[in-house]
Image (cartoon, rainbow, N blue to C red):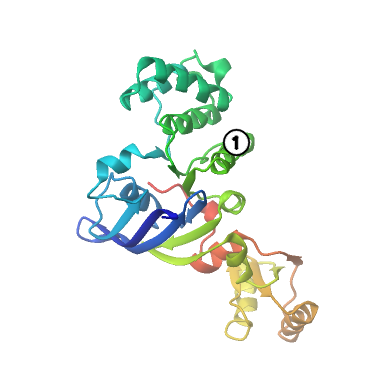
Amino acid sequence: MTAAIEAEGLTKTFGGEVKALNGVGFTVEKGTVLGLLGPNGAGKTTTVRVLTTTLTPDSGWARVNGLDVVKDANKVRASIGLAGQYAAVDENLTGRENLRMVGQLFQLSRKDASRVADELLEHFNLTEAANRPSKTYSGGMRRRLDIAAALVVRPPVLFLDEPTTGLDPNSRNSVWQIVEDLVENGTTVLLTTQYLEEADRLADNIVVVDRGAVIAEGTPSKLKSTLGETVLDLGFADTTTAASAINLFKGSWPAPPVLDGTMVELPIDAGPSQVMIALRTLDEAGIAPTTMTLREPSLDDVFLSLTGRRAELEEAEA
């Protein structure tokens, strides 16, 4: 078996009306990172809750480490690690006490729980703060401690739900390095995130979900290639002018243009000649851009093209 996580046709409805999942399915190969992306309320966290057995799907099936998440729920829970959107540590306990407690909850002996706690504290650069109450930790330290707690039993599969939300850039980079080290040592990671840069750096494969369904899947480079070789950013004086400009390209441009406030983004895949066509079209309509920039496409462009929303403007999913 090469797949660490498999899901097919997952559905989940809340209150008889809200369809949180509408046929979600994907596969995560062992030793890789899957980035699960989507707007607020798209179904990312619901998917994680199904895969980690805290929710039962209405239909469909999923296996983690070859175990059915419904029929073998207890075995699944024993073989995974989970760090949710918010640090789940006990703030009144020290870092060392938190990790020892988790170890004993997983039925490690006191000796083994202490040994594992000390190893993790050193690995996550928390040894100096080990005997301080975790309520005195910074946000980045608490997230590192939370991920460390999810690794006490050395799970082959780790679920990280918005692991760096709210962290400063340095703390975010620290968490990214931890994830890279884990994968290098064979851990499989499913990562939900609202940061496109995070997915671009960490994910081997990306699944984009919206309104409970998978709308795109592929490697970061494959998804970005759907937008062409470059993107022409055209800035306009106001939103009305930008709307008039994009109407000139709708239906006639090789790839769908994107309107973002006063900006129009045109995918370019035919080199400078296509840029000249765009400028000529605007000139003939009497519309002049205030700014013009050529750049490589990003995952944010893909996200906006697929969902109509920018990821960084979305709040973390509840």
- The kind of secondary structure element at disc 1 is loop
Q: Quadrant of residue 105?
A: top left
Rate crowding at label 1 as few (under 14), some (14 to 19) or many (20 or more) other CA atoms within 10 Å: few
Q: Is residue 308 left or right of residue 75?
A: right
Residue farthest to the left, as pictured:
16
Of residues 283 and 205, the one nearer the viewer is: 205
Q: Position of residue 231 (x, y in %)?
A: 69, 69
Rendered location of residue 145, percent (x, y): 48, 27
x and y percent of residue 291 in the render? 76, 66
Q: Which residue is mark 1?
A: 168
User: Which of the image's four quarters has the N terminus?
Assistant: bottom left
Q: Residue at x 45, y 31 (%)?
A: 146
In the image, taking residue 263 as reference, residue 18 lies left or right, namely: left
Q: Is residue 199 shown left or right of residue 65?
A: right
Label 1 amino acid?
A: Asp
Residue at the image point whose x is 76% and y is 84% from the top? 280
Q: Position of residue 144 (x, y in %)?
A: 52, 30
Depth check: 183 or 52 in front?
183
Q: Residue at x 33, y 53 (%)?
A: 63
The quadrant holding residue 305 is: bottom right
